Image: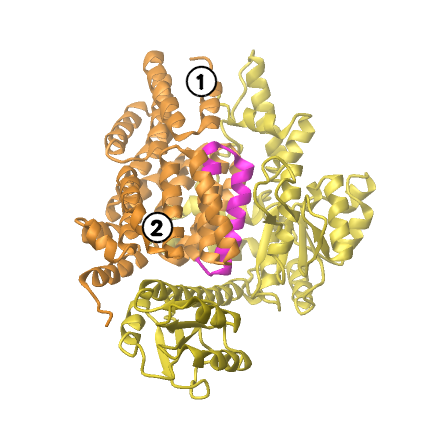
Amino acid sequence: MIGVGRATELLEQARELAKARKFREVTDLLGDLSLETVAEEPELGILRSVALSYQCQHPNAKKNLELIRHIIEGSEDASLMWRWNNSYGVQLTHHGLLEEAETILLACLVNAERTNNLNWIWQATTNLGVIASVRGDVEHALTLNGRALVTAQRIGELYGIGAAHHNSGIVLREWARYDEAASHFAQAHEYFSQSSIPEEIIFTSTERAQLFSCLGDHMLGEELIKRTLSRSREVGNQGLICESLKIYGVILTSVGRLDEARGYLAEASKLGATLYRLLLRAELAEAQTDLELSCGDRDKARGYLDTAIAHYLRLGATAHVERLRYRYRAL
Amino acid sequence: MGCRMESARITVIAPSESFSEIWAQLARFAGAQIEVSPTVGESTSIQSTSGVVIAAGGVEDCSIPLLHELKAAGAPDPVVAGVETNYRTVAGLLQAGATNYFALPGDYMLFRSWIVEQVERESYRKKAEVFTAGERKRFDFSRMIGRSPHLLDSLDRASRVIPRGSATVLVMGETGTGKELLARAIHYNGPRAGSPFVEINCSALPENLLEAELFGYEPGAFTDARVPKPGLFEIASGGTLFLDEIGDLSPQLQAKLLRVLEQRRVRRLGSVRDVDVDVRIVAATHVDLPAAVEDGRFRSDLYYRINVVPLRLPPLRERGDDVLLLAEYFLQRFATEYDMPKPRLDPEIRRALRSYPWPGNVRELRNAVERALLLGGGHLFPGDLFPDGAPRGAAAGVLPFPAPMSEIERAAAHAMVEHCGGNKSQAAKALGISRKHLYSLLSEVGR
């Protein structure tokens, strides 16, 4: 007789929550998960890591994956092993170990293609696209995002379609291809709206606000980011609040309202220090470099620039380091 | 897309009572319906099932005739769940057509995982159907906004192309006129709707990368080619490949594309084997292709090959009052999105909308309406439609004089991109610099 234990019941609950993208609840549910329970239902360990990752707790997510590795391997379940590898690849990316992450995720992609698992192909391709973006390899990121987009369409994954456009928009905006970025963000917004995930819609709105400002329309950028910040606070997502504060600060710096900008960036920095998002921290330091330069304080600007470079280096984002060194070569 | 989908179905053929206690708990865990029948003939789900299990439970030998029977009935490839661990018996089952064998109770977790995977695959198949239906509705010709004769003529011609699933279509029009939207409408309203719609912007990638994307490659074809990769022609198989900005293709890629269109076969980079491809090509460009052919920038044979069904999308300035219809549509949409009352288009706004030439076409109008609505807080003021009449482009502004060379270069880069309607390749070419150099100039911040 094969019975249903407490671990299985826990797994059923956690799967339902994860399906509804309620990751904070997943973390609460699996907060005191023991290795014995994971041994009974190894998927619990993976779900816990995924949930931690969504809350920017990347060191915990990575550590958790490392702890359960032997259990997952012992299960001989190819599906769990694939998910473990994919999740671990994501965590390595967040820790700036791009070479290792790429090797693992490429293996995931090959495996997914061999078994013709479109869901896996979509996930691995999206994650490889993120690595290319972090590296600043725009064209490579665009091709990977394009492929992730096609695969997401083939499985009707609206969130995936939106994410592919969103990721393309970000990398294009970062490298000043604004018109192309605008087109991708418009589509990301469209598909995220259809998939009804408020966080994702807000995330794209923050990016659009920054884009409008890059295009010289600071007034529209400010109006949009004001709304976005308010929505971020409503949904209570710390990462989004921090992102919105940062962009608000960037826009205000652009229009010379430096004291207000300083307030928003200080709040963002305080919040950012509680989140393990190196990219966000790097961008924050970059924004503060701009602010201090605008205030005429070159020493402070130099300090923030060094911080931004250090964060980008930790992420393995060497193209961004080059960009900063070129952009602020006068400092 | 809030429609509730029916759960996936797993069919179990169980000649004995074996494992009868596990089906309910497996069904609950995987969120599936599990139908258990003693024989293949008594199963009602064999044609529509997501997965078939033979529950052999101690009578593994009886499974071989069942495997043959299932194959004859056109069932999906089955797996066998049993208790036998003798490798010869298992090998016999696999030889007879079983795709996997689970020895219970030891393999219970793996068996459960297999069921979950079948359910997930079914769920994605259904989601894809819902997505396609949604896109068909979204891109339906009757929902396209506009009454101008030029537009209606193009839409009429496009709708007549649809049943001819293989006819190549060439969509011409300025930036922002809706070429991609038309390409999607052709795909999702036609016989290829259930297959992929694959798009690529030919001006967004350097030549070597674009070639690898379109045709795919084998390991070792070039330094970074570590694993085999199908090209977009292969990925789009059965569906539509949308080649945006085809006018920007290099001469070498024009020749390769011509070969594919003529032979309907592609060869991956580094491969010695051709692969048949069945795709509809929809090409689009803002370039005047006949003039490009005249100048020798575009191959005439490729032009004639893609110009089978030419469609021209008129610029917004030639569409008369369509600008008002579109503005109404965007107003409604953004008012809903930003939770604001939809304001009226008063005469002053109407005049402003009609008199502006809209060089960025529908895309520019969309942005203008969103801007005016957001800044007006639910009211529309003509002055909010455009950002201070300022030119588009990052850090654009009046160039100080005297100015350092770097400032002049940066301003020239922005001005040329603006002049070329945002087309960076064209701008780089016109400035006589590489795209990379152009991007570095554009990303610089003025001091």
In the picture, measured across the screen, residue A26 lies left or right of residue A322, that is left
Where residue B205 sits in the image (x, y, percent)? 61, 39
Q: Which residues are magenta?
A: A131-157
Res. B71 in view: yes
Q: Residue furthest bottom?
A: B42
Where residue B240 sits in the image (x, y, percent)? 63, 59
Query: In front: B396, or B241?
Result: B241
For label 1, the crowd category at 10 Å Cα-Cα, with few meaning under 14, some 14 to 19 and many 20 or more, is: some
For label 2, the crowd category at 10 Å Cα-Cα, with few meaning under 14, some 14 to 19 and many 20 or more, is: some
Could you tell me which secondary element the residue under label 1 belongs to?
A: loop
From the rendered image, report the letter of the chain displayed in yellow: B
Are labels 2 and 1 on one chain? yes
From the rendered image, report the letter of the chain displayed in orange: A
**Residue, disc 1:** A328
Q: Residue at x 48, y 34 (%)?
A: A215
Res. B385 in view: no
Question: Which chain is mark 1 on?
Answer: A
**Residue, disc 2:** A73
Magenta segment's dominant SS is helix
Q: Earlier in the sequence, mark 2 or mark 1?
A: 2
Could you tell me which secondary element the residue under label 2 belongs to?
A: helix
Disc 2 to disc 1: CB gap under 8 Å: no
Q: Residue at x 33, y 32 (%)?
A: A246
Where residue B359 sits in the image (x, y, percent)? 60, 42
Q: The residue under label 2 is which amino acid type?
A: Glu
Q: For residue A139: magenta? A: yes
Query: Where A279 sits versus A193, above or below?
Result: above
Q: For residue B266: magenta? A: no
Q: The residue under label 1 is which amino acid type?
A: Tyr
Q: Residue at x 50, y 32 (%)?
A: A175
Question: Which chain is mark 2 on?
Answer: A
Q: Quadrant of residue B39?
A: bottom left
